Amino acid sequence: MRGGFIREPATFFCYISPMKPRLLTGLQPSGSLHIGNYFGALKPFAALMKHYDPMLMVVDYHALTTLRDPAALRQNIIDVVKDYLAVGVDPKEAIIFKQSDISEHTELAWIFECLVTVPFLELAHAYKDKVAKGLEANAGLFNYPMLMAADILLYDTDVVPVGADQRQHIEYAREAASKFNRAYGPLFKEPKEKIQDEVSIIPGIDGKKMSKSYGNTIPLFASRDEIAKAVMSIVTDSAGDMPENVYAIHQHFRRKEDLEPLYEQHKGKYKALKEALIEDIDAAIAPMRELRKSITDSDVRHVLAEGGARAKVRATEKMRQVRNAIGVTI
């Protein structure tokens, strides 16, 4: 492919330095990504990679809590990897893999579930929030934090970049590690969250957190027309001179010192400010949009196969230690 992501298999094993702290992140393949995903996860990961031993996971088993369309899930998996590659994540430097390719994730999650209590899991903000929104209270959604804990702890992860609203997930992972270590000996390190407060929560076109479940997103690789349609739908406060929801999104695409004179010049002119936002979003997205078009499904399968093989080596060794510690190895 023109993007240059495909390499011979032998060349993949010499890039990751074991001396760097390990960083792990992931996104659910539950639909098209939006600019909130970009600023909250993809961009920070691409920027942080050079300082860490990076692992990037497509959490397809997590998606099963809400998505029951096999064809859609297959396509979403391919799409999310294309998204990561298009924003600058290089598979020579990061292990890119699929959660379902590593059976140790669900095995370790079961072990953690045997260590925590139902009342402990009932405290999960994400579970209560999703049920309040009308999602089915299935057992997978309830046990979600322990699968996420397994995702993180299986690889001796040092750092997990998350939004401020996801801090509790890392707290749950630390608690799972602590409970295991007290019961069976010090096998798991307790990871730390890395929160970039200025980009942790991106507002949607209605002013709430940008989310597919709210239907308030601006798609990450949208065409200019799609961007314009979304931006023109941003809810504005007609009582004020500055549309706060427009500005809240705009500040992620242009420096504050540039925005202030622009918004002063167009005080009360919401249409002009929305048009300026459209220009800035399209200018930022266009290069990534073009690169993404050059990445084929075959490229993605190759990247996932290589990354899965590398992740499997790490997961297998960790689970060997876990099985020995809990007493199932005889």
Image: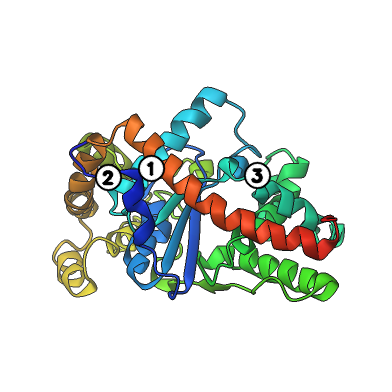
Residue 241, position as x, y percentages in the image: 27, 64
Q: Residue at x 38, y 56 (%)?
A: 13
Element carrying mark 2: loop
Q: Is residue 91 above or below residue 67?
A: below
Residue in front for this viewpoint, 165 or 313: 313
Whether residue 281 is visible: yes
Q: What amino acid type is highlighted by mark number 3?
A: Ser
Residue labelled with disc 1: 303
Q: Mark 2 touching mark 1, by CB under 8 A?
A: yes
Q: How dense is the environment of label 3, judged by Cα within 10 Å: few (below 14), some, or many (20 and up)?
A: few
Image quadrant in which the C terminus is located = bottom right
Q: How dense is the environment of label 1, judged by Cα within 10 Å: few (below 14), some, or many (20 and up)?
A: many
Q: What amino acid type is highlighted by mark number 2?
A: Phe
Q: Is residue 165 left or right of residue 113?
A: left
Image quadrant in which the N terminus is located = top left
Residue in front for this viewpoint, 297 or 306: 306
Residue in front for this viewpoint, 20 or 88: 20
Residue 70, position as x, y percentages in the image: 56, 25
Q: How dense is the environment of label 2, judged by Cα within 10 Å: few (below 14), some, or many (20 and up)?
A: some
Residue labelled with disc 3: 103
Q: Is residue 200 left or right of residue 138?
A: left
Residue 199, position as x, y percentages in the image: 39, 66
Q: How is the image coloured?
A: rainbow
Whole-number angstrom distance, CA of label 2 to CA of label 1: 8 Å
Residue 220, position as x, y percentages in the image: 33, 45
Q: Which one is earlier in the sequence, the residue at label 2 or at label 3?
A: 2
Q: Residue at x 45, y 65 (%)?
A: 200
Q: Is residue 20 above or below residue 55?
A: below
Q: Which one is earlier in the sequence, the residue at label 2 or at label 1?
A: 2
Whole-number angstrom distance, CA of label 3 to CA of label 1: 19 Å
Residue labelled with disc 2: 5
Q: Which one is earlier in the sequence, the residue at label 3 or at label 1?
A: 3
